[in-house]
Amino acid sequence: MLIFDCNSESNLSNWYILDDVVMGGRSSGEFFINDEGHGVFQGTVSLENNGGFSSVRYQPPSTLDISKHQKVVIRLRGDGKSYQFRTKSDVNERYSYITTIKTSGEWEDVEINLKDMYPSFRGRKLDMPNFPAEQLSEIAFLVGNKKAEAFKLEIDEIKLN
């Protein structure tokens, strides 16, 4: 099941940036399709004003039934930094289910077991069950490595297996 295929024809209207500016920070991210047809999430993380993160989020046009799938596979190229991959069953939930991806700087297929993703809110692991992997209403990539830094993550495809 394809969640999103980045290409020169991609509609980015369901993608949006959420940075630490919502709490007074000064980080800045952007998301666009480059000339090669890949989604690019890039920007700068700032620690000023207790900031420290930038994220790009995607909400499919409708909630997806993912009950027949066990893994998400992401074709990406990072900059050697760590990124969180986040999911939500319901967009109204305040918490997300997360896992960390350490990028290599090369194109790679990252495979994530959905049921291994744990619930977290504002950087704290919650005492709740892991992701139920029954429905999906949002995915996100977040960078926040507790240091000021520039970042760049290229995304080719996100699918479920």
Image (cartoon, rainbow, N blue to C red):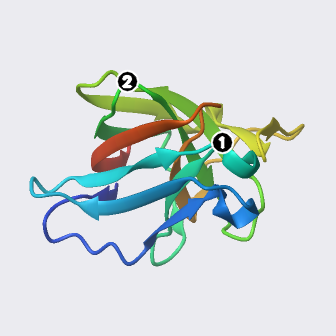
Towards the viewer: 40 or 139:
40
**On the rendered image, what quadrant is the N terminus found in?**
bottom left
Provide residue 108's location: percent of width, then percent of height. 26, 28
* Whole-percent x, y for residue 36 in the image: 9, 53
According to the picture, the residue beneath numbered tag 1 turns out to be: 47
Disc 2 or 1, which lies upstream in sequence? 1
- At numbered mark 2, what does the secondary structure look like: helix, strand or loop? loop
Secondary structure found at label 1? loop
Check the image and report above or below for 20 versus 79. below
Q: Residue at x 23, y 58 (%)?
A: 6
Which residue was labeled with disc 2?
A: 80
Q: Residue lying farthest front? A: 48
- Image coordinates of residue 22 in percent, x first then y, are 70, 65
Residue plotted at (73% across, 61% down): 24
Look at label 2 and name its amino acid.
Gly
User: Residue 61 falls in which quadrant of the image?
Assistant: bottom left
Residue 18, above or below 104: below
